[in-house]
Image (cartoon, rainbow, N blue to C red):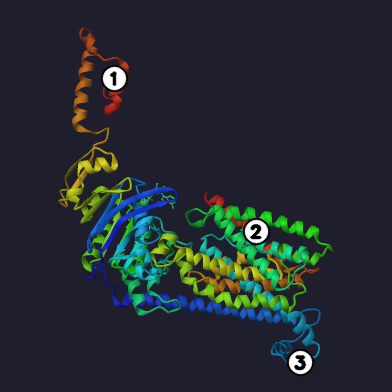
Amino acid sequence: MTLDHALTADALTLGYGERTVIDGLDLVVPPGRITAIVGANACGKSTLLRSMSRLLAPRSGQVLLDGKAVHRMPAKELARTLGLLPQSPIAPEGITVSDLVGRGRHPHQKLLARWSREDDEAVAEALAATQTAELADRSVDELSGGQRQRVWIALALAQRTDVLLLDEPTTFLDVSHQIDVLDLLTTLNHTRGTTIVMVLHDLNLAARYADHLIALAAGRLHAAGPPEQVLTPQTVQAVFGLSSEIITDPVSGKPLMVPRGRHHDLARQDLARQDLARQDLAREDPVREDLVPEEPAREAMEREVGVGRLS
Amino acid sequence: MTAGLVAAPSAVDDVARGRVRRAVRWRAVVTVLAVLVVLTYVLTLMVGRTFYPPGDVVRVVLGQDVPGASFTVGRLRLPRATLAVVAGLSFGLAGVTFQTMLRNPLASPDVIGISTGASAAAAVAIVLLGLGGTAVSVFAIVAGLVVAVLIYLLAYKDGGAGTRFILIGIGMAAMLHSVIAYVLSRASQWDYQEALRWLSGSLNGVTWDRTVPALVVLVVLGPVLLTQTRALEAIQLGDDTASALGVRVERTRLLAMVAAVGVLAFATAACGPIAFVAFLAGPIAARVVGPNGSLLLPAALVGALLVLVADLCGQFAFGTRFPVGVVTGVLGAPYLIYLIVRSNRVGGSL
Ligand SMILES: Nc1ncnc2c1ncn2[C@@H]1O[C@H](COP(=O)(O)OP(=O)(O)O)[C@@H](O)[C@H]1O
Ligand SMILES: [Mg+2]
């Protein structure tokens, strides 16, 4: 087990130019656990991670690692404790997997020092953990999306940090690769005690894999805590503006969000079907003609419930 | 991905072997390039209107007195060949630094107007202000930095890299070219050689007082750039990744930019902006080195080789003598067009 590090945000305000993106955020990342950050597009999740890894200086407030402001720590010292896999890293043309992963050793290397056995071990370990060892000599350009994402995670692993931030590590992956990546991060957390903070788009995967769920809305903390407490219809409504139901995931026992949406709602659809059937009956029976609604109203109803071809 | 998190010793050995193999290849390429540079350098000293055997040339370089050769080789050819090497190293190093830092092969200082800026300033200093020596170099470096900073500010968005940067730079280069043309039209006595020097670079009539400042600056700033290799390679992965790897991105970029413009401007003040050497050296080095290591040193050596070979060709391959920049320009232009056509076809940014 590694040392547990306390990572917190203290009245943190972040922005670009005139615009404030994160406004007075207080946040505690539980050490040694998996934290997932969720929130609508453009609500500032990446901005928050960028500030935690000191790329973006706060307007006010601070990010603290073990009580020290990260923006005042030497860059390499911070990078030996806290790593970040950004949302869209760039692979230079023609770079090989082993070269890319090896660059994760940068914070551990002195200006002109040669490679050490420890560097090789860290790279080998990162390749093994992500099952990319057999790709070592391949060019990153020619890998599939899933392979490439594993290589980027290997780069972050080679850095051997106790705290690892990942910005949407599962985006662009098919569902089985998403589970692969999240399982790998969980193994890392269980075996090494690495503190993991990740931004996830999929609420249900976030609820399943995170010990601690943080919901951001409009640059502020909306809710934080165990998924069972945070993932409620109220939170989903407030954060995503979506009506939903929460049930229990039969596999993991964690909360599972089921969105309501405008279509496919069984309860509403049954009612609508009965209604339309009654109207059709009425049309066949001239005596009951008075029951048929006017055409535009009927079309509107069909559009609304999505059963246009019913009659 | 259920594999354990600890790598077997044999896997570590595999990684170490792969790394050593790449390092050996990299060193082999660098050695071969360095040997080629030395051989071409000596060849440049041997040939000319009179031919001197290698023995004579080496003795002159070592400071011994060889009748005839001491003047022709020592006074005429040595400063010229030395400047060819110094300028080639400088252009190659500056070019690959910009290309790496801005993650784009088009982002070399001779494409985005920095060399043209330095050249225009040198032309103004010499032709209009009647200055000479170090003052010209100072003019050139200040102008190079001003152009670099100007492009950076005009294009500043998401850290300054990208298409905007390059398009604004190309516009700037065109503008500064017209400045050079204007200056030359104002020159009191029309000097054809001078004109060619500031338009496309020339090594004709080089003396030591032009070569030495460029050499000194290269010896000081070249190593500074080489120490930034790993940081620049981290920046290649994106600003976010580099920052996460402990690189101070803006500081590294500033340091690399000042050092690269420094070597570039001093070389430009000595021999003009030898066309496309900065632009070509990096991509050629990438071809030769492959995925085996850093491009900075190999690109510098390729730059030197390009200038030496182009100067030899310009002097002796054709019926008339062409300045070196005309030859490198003929080499570089098709590659520039190829890059632009390719980026159009890929359907994206420059
Ligand atoms: N480099 C930048 N410059 C200016 N605005 C930015 C920059 N990066 C992000 N933003 C803006 O900040 C807001 C939050 O972005 P981001 O943190 O990327 O959101 P998320 O990751 O939650 O989708 C967005 O409105 C985005 O347009
Ligand atoms: Mg984001």
Q: Position of residue B154 (x, y in %)?
A: 56, 53
Q: Mark 1 sits on what residue?
A: A298
Q: Using the image as rendered, state which of residue B4 and residue A116 is in the foreground.
A: A116
Q: Disc 2 on helix, strand or loop? A: helix
Q: Is residue B284 visible?
A: no
Q: Position of residue A271 (x, y in %)?
A: 19, 25
Q: Mark 2 sits on what residue?
A: B334
State yes or no: discs 3 and 1 in contact (Cβ < 8 Å): no
Q: Which amino acid, mark 3? A: Asp
Q: Mark 3 sits on what residue?
A: B65
Q: Is residue B45 visible?
A: yes
Q: Disc 1 on helix, strand or loop? A: helix
Q: Position of residue B240 (x, y in %)?
A: 41, 60
The answer for which chain carries disc 3 is B
Task: Tell me the mark number nearer the camera, choosing from 2 and 1.
Answer: 1
- Same-chain check, marks 2 and 1: no
- Same-chain check, marks 2 and 3: yes
Q: Which amino acid, mark 2? A: Pro
- How many marks can you see? 3
Q: CA distance from mark 2 to mark 3?
A: 45 Å
| Above or below A112: residue A306 | above
Image position of A127 (left or right of A252): right
Residue that appears at 52% across and 61% down? B102
Q: CA distance from mark 2 to mark 1?
A: 67 Å
| Above or below A84: residue B77 | below
**Pointer 2: residues within 10 angstroms few (<14), some, or many (20+)?**
few
Q: Residue farthest to the right? A: B189
- Same-chain check, marks 3 and 1: no
Residue A101, by quadrant, is bottom left
Q: Is mark 1 within 8 Å of ligand 1?
A: no
Q: Which mark is residue A10?
A: none
